[in-house]
Image (cartoon, rainbow, N blue to C red):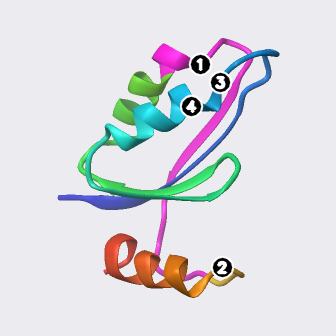
Amino acid sequence: MSKPYIISYDLNTPGQTYEKVKDVIINFGGAYIKLQASFWLVRNDLTPGEMQQKLNSVLDKNDELFICEAVSNYQGLASKENWDFIRESIFY
């Protein structure tokens, strides 16, 4: 059963590419949306541990990563398109 998650990270080694992290997140399967530079909402069948294991391949030991199950109690500022996607694909 898929669940919604928050993924947030900081890549602390100079020269790292955020594209590699993006590719791993996209390949989790399910729905995903990048809301800020290093902040994603995803919905998939993986556990936080499984997602971290996959992300470890593109992270260094001094990088920071936070993955947390999300609940449908949210507020913020985003485009109408993003809100529609969040309601329809993340918190349905």
- Where does residue 58 sit, x and y in percent of width and height? 53, 18
Q: Secondary structure at mark 3?
A: loop
> What's the mark number on residue 78?
2
Amino acid at the residue labelled 1: Leu
Using the numbered discs, state the Cα–Cα distance from disc 4 to disc 3 in whole angstroms: 5 Å
For label 1, the SS is: loop
Establish if 61 lies above or below 24.
Answer: above
| Front residue of 5 and 31 | 31
Task: From the image, tell me which residue sits under label 4.
Answer: 19
- The residue tagged 3 is 17
Left or right, 15 with respect to 38, comes to: right
Q: Secondary structure at mark 2?
A: loop
Q: Where residue 51 appears, x then y in whole percent? A: 40, 35
How far across and how far down the image is residue 59, in percent? 59, 19
Q: Residues within 10 Å of mark 2 (few under 14, many from 20)?
A: few
Q: Residue at x 42, y 76 (%)?
A: 85
Q: Is residue 79 above or below residue 27?
A: below
Which is more foreground, mark 1 or mark 3? 3
Is 20 magenta? The answer is no
Indicate which label's residue lies in the foreground, 2 or 1.
Answer: 2
> What's the magenta region?
56-74
Residue under label 1, please give it. 59
Task: Tell me which amino acid carries mark 2.
Answer: Ala
Looking at the image, residue 56 sits to the left or right of residue 44; the answer is: right
- Cα distance, mark 1 to mark 3? 10 Å
